[in-house]
Amino acid sequence: MSKKKNSNNKEEKNISSVIEKASKNSESAEEIAKEEISDVEETADEEAVLDEESAVDKASSDGEVEYTTQMKQYQEMLQRENATHEKKDPILRRFMTAFGNVFALNICFIIASLGVVTIGAALTALFSMCMKLQDNNTDAQIVKEYFTEFKKNFKKATLEWLIVLGVLGVMTGEYLLVVTQPGTLATFYTIVLIAELVVLALVMAFLFPLTARFENTIVNTFKNSLLLSLGNLWDFAKIFLIWFVPIFYTIKDPVVFFNIWYLYLLIAFGTMAYLSTMTIRNVFKKVSVTQEEEQKKHEDQIYASTHRSGVADKANVLSKYTGSKNAPVDNKKYSTTKASNGGKK
């Protein structure tokens, strides 16, 4: 009986130990589970906080973008309103300003032309200042800048004017032959004289404005002036009428000359130069646009000629992989076609 009791006690102890171990294991498992749950909750909370912060940052950034765009729109609106409501100078004031500038230029031109030989440089400076005034250079110091332009272009413009005077001298001799030698010779020199007058008029329209605006040789300046007149006949006609009509009628009728001679001293030359410069500037704008297009075309041609070998090699390599049965690309032929197409790809 005692042995049975001992065995029963051992069994009870074993059972109780097993139960204790099981309870301990369950408690540890519960603790681990709780810790894992708390970790998950903490990470979830952190992620939520981060999401909230990112949402706030995004909202603030969106608000800043919206704010800046609204401010830009508001500033643009203010600028438009200021531009529309900006008060311009009265017409009378603007007219008086233009009149004063033209008057000052005319006086400067008369003073600079007193030597007769210096008329070319005086005309060049006159056109240069008219172009500056029409380029909205309202801060120009008329007298100072006029004589600066006069000195800068003096040598070239004077040589051009001497050439014009030489041509006028030859034409004067031909005119005397026409008057004194009637018959076939007079008819011949009349035709020659008319042709020379037409060419001289075509050249004079743009000669001194070109000298004032562009750097070039004297020969090229004469040639370009003639080409500009031939290429812009309507503009030449306007310039010719602005200068020719007043001077012709003043010289033709002595009564007109004695009645209005003082206007030439005060404002006539400046007014004619200012009015003709409006047309001249438009022609120069056309020339600049044409030069830019030609320069671009020339650069494209140079690029095609310098890279034609590389383009041809690439085309030949591609033909091998694509199975094209076309003949290999000829570098020379490619360069000529590119040049004929203006370098366009």
Image (tube, grey):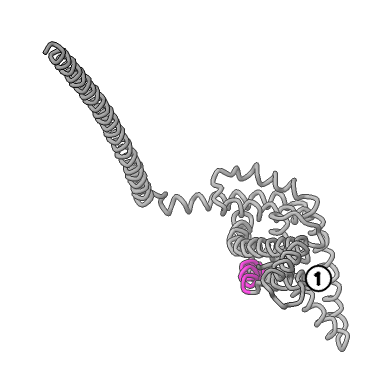
Q: Against 302, is 115 above or below?
A: above
Picture coordinates of residue 84, whole percent (x, y): 36, 52
Look at the image and tell me whether residue 237 can be seen: yes
Indicate the quadrant where residue 55 lies.
top left
Q: Is residue 326 left or right of residue 140?
A: right
Looking at the rendered structure, the secondary structure element under dot 1 is: helix
Picture coordinates of residue 140, whole percent (x, y): 58, 44
- Membership of 108 in magenta stretch: no
- Membership of 242 in magenta stretch: yes
Residue that mark 1 sits on = 332
Q: Residue at x 72, y 64 (%)?
A: 314
Q: Against 284, is 32 above or below?
A: above
What secondary structure predominates along the stretch shown in magenta?
A: helix
Look at the image and tell me whether residue 254 can be seen: no
Q: Is residue 239 left or right of residue 20?
A: right
Residue stretch rendered in magenta on the structure: 234-249
Indicate the quadrant where residue 184 lies.
bottom right
Q: Residue at x 63, y 44 (%)?
A: 143
Count of labels in the image: 1
Picture coordinates of residue 214, whole percent (x, y): 71, 55
